[in-house]
Amino acid sequence: MIDIYEEIYKMKQNGQEGVSVTVVQRKGHGPANVGKKLLVYANGEKKGTVGGGELEYLAIEKAKELMNTKKHYMQSYDFSGKTPTKDTVSIDMICGGLVTLYFEYIPVNPRIYILGAGHVGKCLADVLINSDYKTTVIDDREEIAEAINKNHEIVVGDYAEKIGKLDIPEGSYIVITGYTHEIDYKILKAVYEKDCKPKYIGMLASKNKAGIMVNKLKEEVDKEIDLSMLHAPIGLNIGGDTPEEIAISILSEIQAVRYNKDGNKHMTEKWSI
């Protein structure tokens, strides 16, 4: 017997979105009892059932639609053969009942990649422990990486090499907190040379350092490179200069970007390029 909750857990661990469909009401006769569940994946595959037939076909189609709108939904399906109302969908199965399905959109946990596990990087990882972000921390110093909370994914090795091997989902958040200017640029360049589409790239840097690196990046990678997601200096201008305070500033900026909140004072300004 399929445990839908276990399948949902596996789906989220694999970075997949989906829709859970549950029979929440049945009046009269219908193809499935209350509590039956169906899990629909983004590729159209399914596990579980809400009764099969036309009802299940329509449920899967609605689930696919909701993966675009990313919303929850409730819909009643009429098996009586009567003319449908504005609140019901008529199904050509004369069972004589009414079935209501609840569609729950299950999002992908947002991914954050912390590239550099020094003072600020470690503090940011600590702040993220109880959040819904799935966090990967990369550092080329084994002794530094060992200090990171083991609830996070930890990768030790050369930054460029490890970044090249990562499968970074579209819409991810990347934070660059290396321990030298050279390391930061190496990381930044590796990210921009990778075929990925992050929603946010933040780099711990002064305005002058950011401008120099952007110029170098345009020369070495692409003059028309997309800098719209790059935030350097990183963080919101909320005050404080300790690693803990800077970590809060960084996460605040990521939250603002994640939820499309305008009006915040970002540290990033136009570079002299």
Image (spheres, grey):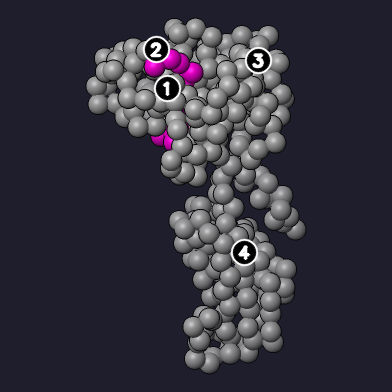
The first of marks 4 and 1 along the sequence is: 4
| Residue labelled with disc 1 | 232
Relative height, residue 48 to residue 154 (above, below): below
The three-letter code of the residue at mark 4 reads Val
| Front disc: 2 or 4 | 2
Residue 154 seen by the camera: no
Residue occupying image coordinates x 69% and y 84%? 27
Q: Which residue bears the numbered disc 3?
A: 145
- How far apart, in angstroms, are the residues tagged by discs 2 and 1? 9 Å
Magenta region, residue range: 197-207
- What SS does tag 1 mark? loop
Q: Residue at x 62, y 44 (%)?
A: 12
Q: Residue 205 vs residue 114: left or right?
A: left
* Amino acid beneath label 1: Ala
Q: Residue at x 70, y 15 (%)?
A: 146
Residue type beneath disc 2: Lys
The residue singled out by tag 2 in the image is 209
Secondary element at tag 2? helix
Q: Which residue is mark 4?
A: 21
C-beta proximity under 8 Å, tags 2 and 4: no
Give how far across and how far down residue 45 sits, in percent: 54, 55
Q: Are marks 2 and 1 in contact (CB under 8 Å)?
A: yes
Q: Tell me the quadrant of the picture where the N terminus can be found.
A: bottom right
Of circles 4 and 1, the one toward us is: 1
